[in-house]
Image (cartoon, grey):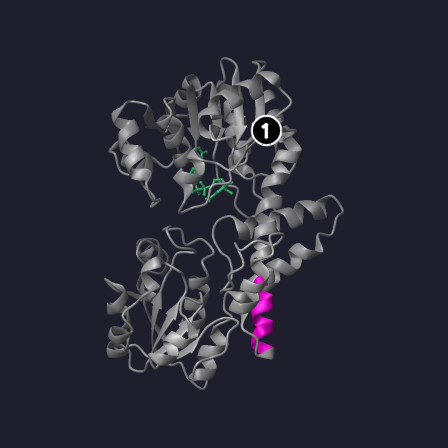
């Protein structure tokens, strides 16, 4: 099939590449000229595991092309995906200016029937707005479909190729047939394509993300309470998670969720409920708890150093908002860095993939190390913000040799309390007893 994907970020580029992988001819459109030039030269502009192999293969096969011209994309694609940003607006709502701006342009250049697919995460009622924005400029027939994306950064290729479900929101038989045909190769193992109305599809995405954010946040509150009463959140987690109604996943406490989705999506759902006169109280609590959780370790750092952080050198492992991505949007590490710098500490960071993005954001406010151990050389403490696999089994001997004192603040509970205790570390984590 002939496909256009408008917007080549984490969602658009993965969507375009993975659709080309099953034989579709895909043109990806982006307004960022330098990004498009990079991709035309065969360079993947983001870090996403396994994407490079598929990217190269499909470019070579001539099934994956890049352009800055919306018209070229639209002329080519029978199905046109909108994978555009929907960032948080000042009032917490999702800013639709990118989506509606492109819809407006589509109305001016559309020449024959198209299925316009909202893949961006958009509030209830956006399909109607997209339809109105296009049709005010044209009489050509088209359909708008809501097809929210559930991929996870770090697993995006796998998630796209083997989705647990595909959600299609549409009232047009013609559009539904085309979408089912397009997605059939991805659900051969029997996972469902769930067809529903546009509004339910739009809400499904927000409901899923907000539920997951609530699950994480609930566990973080349990962890904070564990600290107050001397319980161990690891034990509580294991005891809870074996209940199949609860499940084992998303129960790991830490220094809060970040990223480009959960923070803005929880706020956008709260705001769109408010606009419909519904006070979605639990989401308000989730936003507030998560905000303070991002710096939950800071008071422990402050206490340990008796409030005097001036000139202290902190080695920081993990900048990305989660492992296996270079995405730093709303990353807890950035909030911790802010606090540390405010109190006069110096930070030397290491992250396997996200350092370039942080360098662009913070310049020389912090320093960067070539590897995880270099960051710890002559540091007063190690602070862990992201649970990259390579941080899970470090050489404690090397750490002891490098650090001024064997001292770890762990925002992701990577280590067993007995292990770090035997190794002679002072160790602070989340929801567990401090090892001193
Ligand atoms: P992104 O910021 O990584 O990428 C967006 C891309 O759109 C950028 O390359 C930008 O240059 C381009 N763009 C902006 N305006 C344009 C225009 N007028 N024409 C063409 N291109 C334009 O965003 P993302 O993370 O891929 O997210 C896109 C949408 O998907 C958002 O609504 C997001 O909430 C949703 N989503 C994201 C994820 C995720 O893990 N990142 C997962 C599911 C859903």
Q: Which residue in the rendered view is the most extreme toward the bottom?
A: 306
Q: As displayed, is residue 175 above or below residue 343?
A: above
**For the point 45% across and 86% down, which residue is it?**
306
Q: Residue 42's spot in the image, x, y percent?
A: 25, 34
Q: Residues within 10 Å of mark 1 (few under 14, many from 20)?
A: many
**For the point 70% across and 46% down, which residue is it?**
273
Q: Residue 129's spot in the image, x, y percent?
A: 62, 30
In the rendered image, the quadrant that contains the N terminus is top left
Front-lying residue, 110 or 117: 117
In the rendered image, the quadrant that contains the C terminus is bottom left
Q: Residue 27's spot in the image, x, y percent?
A: 37, 25
**For the point 42% across and 41% down, which residue is it?**
156
Q: As displayed, is residue 88 above or below residue 284?
A: above
**For the point 38% across and 60% down, which residue is it?**
319
Front-lying residue, 10 or 277: 10
Q: Which residue in the rendered view is the most extreme toward the right?
A: 277
Disc 1, ligand 1: is the CB inside 8 Å? no
Residue 131, magenta (yes or no)? no
Q: From where the camera sits, is residue 29 visible?
A: no
Q: Residue 85's spot in the image, x, y percent?
A: 49, 40
Quick one: SS at disc 1?
Answer: helix
| Residue marked by disc 1 | 130
Q: Specify the principal SS of the magenta part.
A: helix
Horizontal placement of 59 versus 75: left or right?
Answer: left
Q: As displayed, is residue 168 above or below residue 363?
A: above
Q: From where the camera sits, is residue 258 visible?
A: yes
Horizontal placement of 271 versus 292: left or right?
Answer: right
Range of residues picked out in magenta:
219-228
Q: As displayed, is residue 337 above or below residue 323?
A: below
């Amino acid at each position: 099939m002939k496909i256009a994907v408008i917007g080549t970020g984490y969602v658009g580029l993965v969507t375009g590449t993975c659709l080309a992988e099953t034989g579709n001819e895909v043109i990806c459109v982006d307004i960022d000229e330098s990004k498009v030039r990079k991709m035309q030269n065969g360079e993947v502009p983001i870090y996403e595991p396994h994407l490079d192999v598929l990217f190269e293969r499909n470019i070579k096969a001539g099934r994956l092309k890049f352009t800055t011209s919306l018209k070229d994309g639209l002329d080519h694609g029978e199905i046109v995906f909108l994978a555009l940003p929907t960032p948080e607006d000042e009032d917490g709502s999702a800013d639709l200016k990118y989506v509606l701006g492109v819809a407006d342009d589509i109305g001016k250049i559309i020449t024959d029937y198209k299925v316009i697919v909202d893949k961006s995460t958009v509030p209830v009622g956006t399909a109607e707005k997209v339809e109105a924005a296009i049709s005010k400029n044209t009489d050509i027939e088209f359909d708008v479909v809501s097809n929210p994306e559930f991929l996870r950064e770090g697993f995006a290729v796998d998630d796209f190729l083997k989705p647990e479900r595909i959600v299609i929101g549409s009232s047009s038989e013609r559009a539904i047939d085309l979408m089912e045909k397009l997605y059939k190769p991805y659900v051969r193992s029997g996972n469902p394509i769930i067809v529903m109305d546009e509004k339910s599809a739009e809400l499904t995405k927000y409901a899923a993300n907000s539920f997951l954010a609530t699950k994480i946040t609930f566990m973080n509150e349990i962890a904070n309470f564990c600290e107050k009463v001397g319980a161990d959140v690891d034990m509580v987690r294991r005891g809870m998670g074996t209940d199949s109604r609860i499940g084992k996943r998303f129960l790991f406490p830490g220094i809060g969720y970040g990223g480009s989705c959960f923070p803005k999506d929880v706020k956008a759902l709260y705001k769109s409920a408010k606009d419909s006169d519904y006070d979605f109280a639990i989401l308000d609590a989730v936003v507030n708890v998560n905000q303070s959780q991002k710096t939950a370790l800071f008071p422990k750092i402050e206490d340990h150093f008796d409030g005097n952080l001036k000139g202290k050198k902190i080695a920081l492992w993990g900048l990305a908002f989660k492992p296996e991505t270079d995405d730093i949007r709303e990353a807890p590490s950035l909030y911790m860095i802010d606090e540390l710098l405010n109190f006069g500490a110096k930070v030397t960071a290491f992250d396997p993939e996200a350092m370039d993005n942080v360098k662009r954001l913070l310049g020389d406010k912090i320093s960067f190390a070539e590897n995880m151990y270099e960051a710890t050389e002559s540091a007063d403490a190690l602070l862990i913000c992201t649970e990259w696999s390579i941080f899970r089994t470090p050489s404690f001997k090397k750490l002891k040799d490098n650090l001024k004192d064997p001292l770890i603040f762990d925002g992701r509970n990577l280590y067993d309390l007995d292990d770090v205790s035997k190794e002679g570390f002072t160790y602070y984590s989340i929801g567990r007893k401090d090892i001193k």
